[in-house]
Image (spheres, helix red, strand yellow):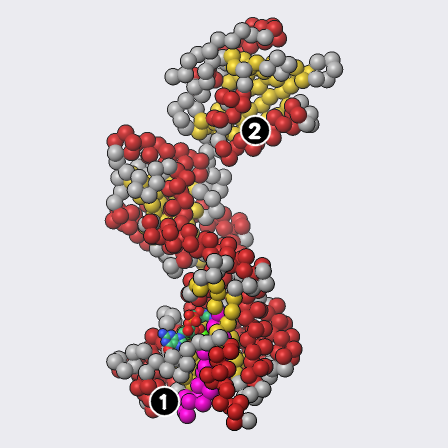
Amino acid sequence: MRQKRYIALSPLLKRIKFYFDLFSKTNDNYICAIDLQNPMILLSPNMVTDFALPGTVLDSMEKYWVPLIHPEDRGIYETAIREMLIERKRNDYDIEYRVRDSRGEYCWIRCRGRLATNHEGKPTLFAGAMARMGRRNQADSVTGLLNKYQFEHGVSLALSEYRATGKGGALILLGLDNFKIINETYNRFFGDAVLKTMAREIDNILPSMFILYKLDGDEFGIIYPEASESDVEELFASIQKCLMRPHTMDGKMYFCTISAGTVFYPAFGKDYLVLHKHAEAALDMAKRNGKNRNCIFTKEHYNRWVRSISMRDNLRISVEAGCEGFSLFYQPQMQAKGTQIMGAEALLRWKNPKGRMVAPMEFIPILEETKLIIPVGRWILEEAVKTCMKWQKILPDFTMSVNVSYEQIKDSSFKEFIQECLPKYGIRPDTLILELTESSIVSDWGFVNKQFDFYRSIGIKIAMDDFGTGYSSLVYLKNLSCDIVKVDRAFVSNILESKFDLHLVEYTANLCHSVGMEVCCEGVEKNEEYQMLLDVCNVDMVQGYLFGHPEIEENFEKKFLESYNEQK
Ligand code: C2E
Ligand code: CA
Ligand code: CA
């Protein structure tokens, strides 16, 4: 307990004290009067008790009141005071902010105040009334569920419970998958209606002792006291099952899956902000690992997540500096018969600002996610085409394969960029191959095919990358118009041991040949593999360490092109 302090009242406050007391006794609001000339503050007694203030007379609001205001809301308070007292823009204010009460919990208050001025227009007295805002502001306006502030409150109660009893639990964040697509495909009203339905359905299946909170955007929160990992998994599975069936609204059918991020307290945090951050990280990971799953937060996860956040910033720095730190390596692609060099695949490399090489599998997904792949993709294309021009002076039919992401295909200006780039370096379109990773295609065959048709109509070749790795490769093959299918290394490296893999490659090659497509096998490391691919599978092209590793431009020239140069 802080000691009560007694301060003699200023003459102005003394004069109004009678009315002040009368008013505070007949009213539930918190009231305060401030003598501005002779800085001193008079507070109603309920304010002293409810906010553990040192007494009804104070000499400063800065010292006692401001520290109780929620850090996020201090700006609102300070702006209102500044505009009224210093900038003299107004004589009153009406603001809402959160204040920590004597129980240590934040409550929302609405604060209305007015200035009185003297005959010279100078502020003399400020009088304010503050009201606690009951359930208003506690509910989410779309779903009617308790909102994120109540979630925060609920978490702090759960943590107090832990401190009192030693019993921990879990925080679960739920996020609807692809909600953005629903919003974009239809409209916000439809999106809101979907949120409402989902909220109702999840709420219905939650055991009655749980509260479902609606957080920002498409996220929900649940606090699960005394939970074990299997409790959480079980709860999540039941939510998943309930949402998974197709839903219809206004005659429109939609599917919605959900991802979750779970963090256990106190093991991974003893305060709301830390726990929330960790649960967000887990949810983010669940979404990145393919969505429709729950990810439980571990320390290792956290470190990885932090790395990817800093990588995002570093990639942006590199891109803004004109793609500094990026470079291309080239791996030879050979004609299967006779192993003559046919061309090269350009493979992106990146050195972070500290000079460390980062694996493409780590940074390319981030480039795609942040859409930085669009500027980087242009840089890659131009670099690769430039190099191709050089090498076509040695081998006129030299082909250059460039990897492109779905994001780049979606960007319609990429087409124009390619059309400008090829003549600029004098490259024939039929010596450029665009490799598209199938797993990166989400939906919309129609659109992708239209883009492919355009590229093919001007002579550019299209290759389907990583054939066999996705769960629907044959569907892709059936639906996409392409010129070359690249069979993934996973099959090639198994053909010596697995008859299934061997036949898969063989049949894929037959199927492709029957419709005029060519087949390139990636990741050929052993001579026996190569022989098998040539003799049994009859593939057209091969690529892999057996023929050459990815190399920088200079080394590629030395290793694979110098002999031709000498012949000329
Ligand atoms: P990818 O397109 O399937 O590229 C082939 C990957 O296999 C390359 O890895 C290459 O170095 C590796 N590789 C080639 N031959 C062998 C072999 O015989 N054995 C083994 N073990 N590996 C082999 P890398 O360079 O790490 O690239 C990984 C992936 O990153 C690429 O897979 C591609 O999906 C993506 N990528 C690389 N460069 C670009 C780019 O410029 N743009 C885009 N969008 N994606 C790129
Ligand atoms: Ca590729
Ligand atoms: Ca591949």
Element class at badge 2: helix
Q: Give the mark nearest the N terminus, 1 or 2.
A: 2
In the picture of the structure, the residue carrying the numbered disc 1 is: 534
Please, what is the three-letter code of the amino acid marked with disc 2?
Answer: Tyr
Whether tag 1 and tag 2 are in contact, CB under 8 A, the answer is no
Q: Is most of the magenta stretch helix, strand or loop?
A: strand
Q: CA distance from mark 1 to mark 2?
A: 76 Å
Q: Quadrant of ligand 1?
A: bottom left
Q: What residue is drawn where x is 48% and y is 24%?
A: 132
Q: Which residues are magenta?
A: 331-348
Q: What residue is drawn where x is 50% and y is 10%?
A: 25
Q: Is residue 38 above or below residue 556?
A: above
Name the outermost residue toward the bottom.
567
Residue 345 position, x and y percent, is 48, 77
Q: Is residue 496 magenta?
A: no
The mark total stands at: 2
Can residue 541 be seen by looking at this rendering? yes
Q: Is residue 332 magenta?
A: yes
Picture quadrant where residue 534 is located? bottom left
Q: Is residue 452 above or below residue 297?
A: below
Where, quadrant-wise, is the C terminus in this rendering? bottom right
In the picture of the structure, the residue carrying the numbered disc 2 is: 77
